[in-house]
Amino acid sequence: MYDVLIIGSGAAGLTLALSLPETIKIALLSKDVLTEGSTFYAQGGISAVLDKADSFESHISDTLNSGAGLCNEDVVRHVVKSGPKAIDWLLEVGVPFTREDNNIEGSAGLHLTREGGHSNRRVAHAADASGKAIETTLVEKIKSRENIEVFEHHISIDLITSRKLRQRENRCIGAYVLDRKKQKVSTFTSRFTILATGGASKVYLYTSNPDGSSGDGIAMGWRAGCRVANMEFMQFHPTCLYHPQAKSHLITEAVRGEGGKLLLPDGTRFMPKFDPRAELAPRDIVARTIDHEMKRLGIDSVFLDISHKPKDFILEHFPNIYAMCESFGYDMSKQPVPVVPAAHYTCGGIMVDNTGHTDIDGLYAIGETTFTGLHGANRMASNSLLECIVFGQATAKDIMQRYEKRPNPPEYEIPDWDESRVTDSDERVVINHNWDEIRHFMWDYVGIVRTTKRLQRARNRIEMLLSEIDEYYSNFRITSDLIELRNLAEVARLIIRSAQQRTESRGLHYTLDYPNADPALEKVNSILDPIKRSSSS
């Protein structure tokens, strides 16, 4: 029995663990090694108002504009105003942010870059590997805490709730978890359970995310009884390296922030024709414009060019990206590099309040797994890591308040995981085939540009596949791949249902059948309720 069970080991989960007192017994689960996840691969940085020329109101306004009328302004205001304190905390724990002058102490001495949607330089970064710097620093702190027990290579199967045990109330009391190495299922019980499993971009054929981004937390929360919202808003990063051997290699938006230009194969710039902000327009606009030009011209990619900058400048600001491109035969200092959009960030998720609490007592969700109201219809660059830190700390505070108010929680008899009526599968091809089919039709039918007919085709396919997957799940022994496939399919259905619900184009959701935003739908979120099955609020 643990006081707190944290499922996920990215910036949100690690921040929460480190923000709880050392008297609290914590289990921290990671699907892979502790550092593997989207945080580790984040390049750009974390946004906060740190420059005297900047202001909270400017950051708030930029976020609201990017969110296309669906941000919760109170949440935006709270997160933005918490930004400087979040940076200070990261500096205190030792994150090696890039500085203007190494002799200057405090957040005012940080080098700040600018990304799409931002009207000022406000992105603190560690060269072009900010996520790696944050993740590895927090992991080192975690290892020094005796109250935190780390379980690597463990994937959660499902949450355990009192309602599933035929109790009247619906309280989360832990999770069934598969040890991926030993292939053994264990029962983790806890007073408080936190879903911090990241997003679901692996539901698409092309993505900048690592393999673990299969929407596990969203699917588990939904099955347990949590509402989800705004799942139609899947962000596609405009610039991932295009190369047959390049898997998930993102080229940070900061390259455009430092003067990189998007070009057609003949060397012509095209972004200024579509938006006055050109390459620094919000991601939905840039990704959609690239997609439009690729389809219009029948080309495989467009090109990103920063070769007009000195090589020393490129190596100083983007050393890892330069090395990555060079490994595939491209010299950023001498030539443009081919880029395409790829699924990058899940703007919707499990509905939570300002403390990360869900609809279920004892269950929290933080980070990309959630819908907080911060991102609206389109997340602004580098606001996601800020959200992880702010909500991780807020959740820790709320947990302790509830912990102290209820020192003796009820106890439940929880049955062990039952494998008595299943066998080992001799048809693994079913998992591989269904996985590939989902990612292909989601890319083709529910991608950057959608239509009503495409969405219905996708809905028909996912309903059929979910039926096959459920039958397979009932008859065969659980595996990590089966768990991820089941979750991926459920999240795909949630994305499709949400997209069908929104009869307009707004932010990241663009449909040819409703190409304009509907003023009546401003502030209207797409809410799916597992009890009511479908509702809109």
Image (cartoon, grey):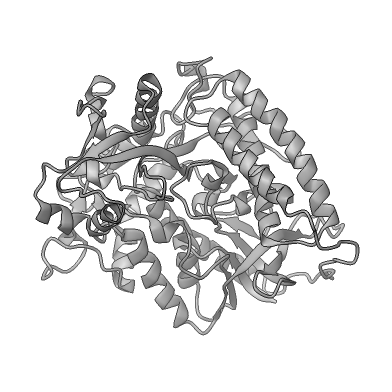
List x then y, in percent, for residue 88: 29, 64
Which corner quadrant holds the N terminus?
Answer: bottom right
**Is there any visible trace of residue 229 in the rendered image?**
yes
Q: Is residue 129 above or below residue 185?
A: above
Residue occupying the point 41% across, 29% down? 68
Q: Is residue 308 above or below residue 402?
A: above
Left or right: 335, with 461 as reference point: left
**Is there any visible trace of residue 532 in the rendered image?**
no
Q: How many marks?
A: 0
Which of the pair 402/140 is nearer the observer? 140
Residue occupying the point 35% across, 29% down? 290
Which corner quadrant holds the C terminus?
Answer: top right
The answer to which image quadrant residue 172 occupies is bottom right
List x then y, in percent, for residue 425: 80, 59
Which of the pair 47/282 is nearer the observer? 282
The answer to which image quadrant residue 96 occupies is bottom left
List x then y, in percent, for residue 350: 59, 46
Left or right: 486, with 421 as reference point: left
Which of the pair 492/29 is nearer the observer? 492
Left or right: 180, with 211 as reference point: right
The answer to which image quadrant residue 197 occupies is bottom right
List x then y, in percent, for residue 220: 68, 53
Residue occupying the point 60% across, 19% down? 452
